[in-house]
Amino acid sequence: MEQLKECIGIINEVSPFDKYFAELEMLYDKICIFGMGSYGTEILPILKKKLGNRIRCVSDNDKNKHGKEYCGIKCVPPHELDKNTYIFVSIFQADDIIAELSAKGFYVINQELQNSFDLFRLYGFRQSGKLYTENYEGLEKVFSLFSDDLSRQIFIRRIQYNILPYENKRFFDTVYSGDQYFPDDIITLNDNETFIDGGGYTGDTIQNFIARTKSNFNSIYSFEVDEKNYAIMNAYIKTLPENLSQKIFIFQYGLSNQEEKIKLIGNGASTHVQKVGGVFSDNFGKLVALDNVVSNKSSVSFIKLDIEGYERNALIGMMETIKNSKPKMAVCIYHKPEDVYEIPLLLHEMNPAYRFFLRHHGHDWNYAGETVLYVIPEKNI
């Protein structure tokens, strides 16, 4: 517990992001946000709130976006930009765009940023320091729930990574492990599993599950909200022998706590629900509660959730299933800073007999996703 206290003790109430934007406000008075893709459209409301009328316009290389308004700000073609305008590139992995704009004579603000600053973390973790100090009792409770030292060590490093965005440290290199969703030291699969695959993507987890069970399982229910991913997964299922495919049920839905129609942004593995309004999107999907889809709530034996920040809502939407079947689970807790304590506490409340383990599967420090909570019922210990 002393490690946790020490970790939280280094938090500054004013985040590094707040300090950075205070500098931007002081130094630059005519800014263009360049890049209205999946990251840019989510980050723009935050930038607008921080920088106000210093944002004169937005821009993008995509001609289809020119003339549209994003959060009330007009998107102009790059060739119409004033060379005296400072550019903030709102594109993940933006090196090529930054080089292109710099070569054209624009001053790109991002060039001053350290490598560990990226827009995804700006969006997701900008207030995590204050969040953790205000919820320290919850962090202590979760810390005490873990069943092994490695889980507690990863928990500390996950928090450190979330609150130290400028620190060029490799938090996870020495605790990295493979076998995401099915680590051999935690998850044991039998030949009668009913598996819920939340975030089915293109069927990669289904393929892994089939291999690990040697094709001996009861059924698979997979949920994937992205139309293209769903189509690829559906095509894969059709290639399987009939004795397997007839036991696999796939749905073009996302999982949440209720049924609702939502906007989607991003593509492929990064497709997620649009959390802010006022931006252009014509990609829609549907969310459902698992309790309303799976009829036999006592048969589910294993649940995996990797659904881009909707894990907690999805767990609420499958509360009856969890209470009735007491399944083992693999739940991602890295998409939102509060997930590290809210999700374990929620599951502990649902079943106080659960045991908790934490493993990290993202090998590179600057791509520090894939922290997974494993929840094991007494019957599997």
Image: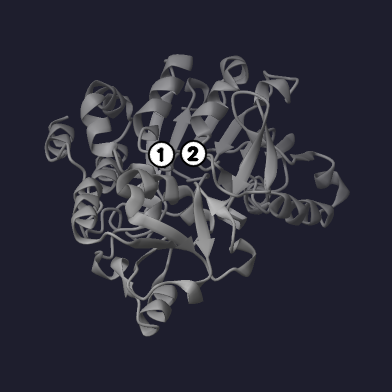
Using the image as rendered, state which of residue 119 and residue 244 is in the foreground. Answer: 119
Where residue 103 sits, quadrant-wise, is: bottom left
Q: Are marks 2 and 1 in contact (CB under 8 Å)?
A: yes
| Residue at the limit of the structure toward the bottom, as seen here | 103
The spot of residue 165 in percent (x, y) is 25, 52
Using the image as rendered, state which of residue 133 and residue 206 is in the foreground. Answer: 133
Q: Amino acid at mark 1?
A: Lys
The residue to which callout 1 is attached is 336
Above or below for 348 versus 261:
above
Quarter placement of the N terminus: top left
Earlier along the polypeptide chain: callout 2 or callout 1?
2
Residue displayed at 62% across by 45% down: 264
The residue to which callout 2 is attached is 309
The spot of residue 254 in percent (x, y) is 65, 37
Residue 224 seen from this side: no
Q: Amino acid at mark 2?
A: Gly
Please tell me how crowded label 1 is: few (under 14), some (14-19), or many (20+) other residues with Cα within 10 Å.
many
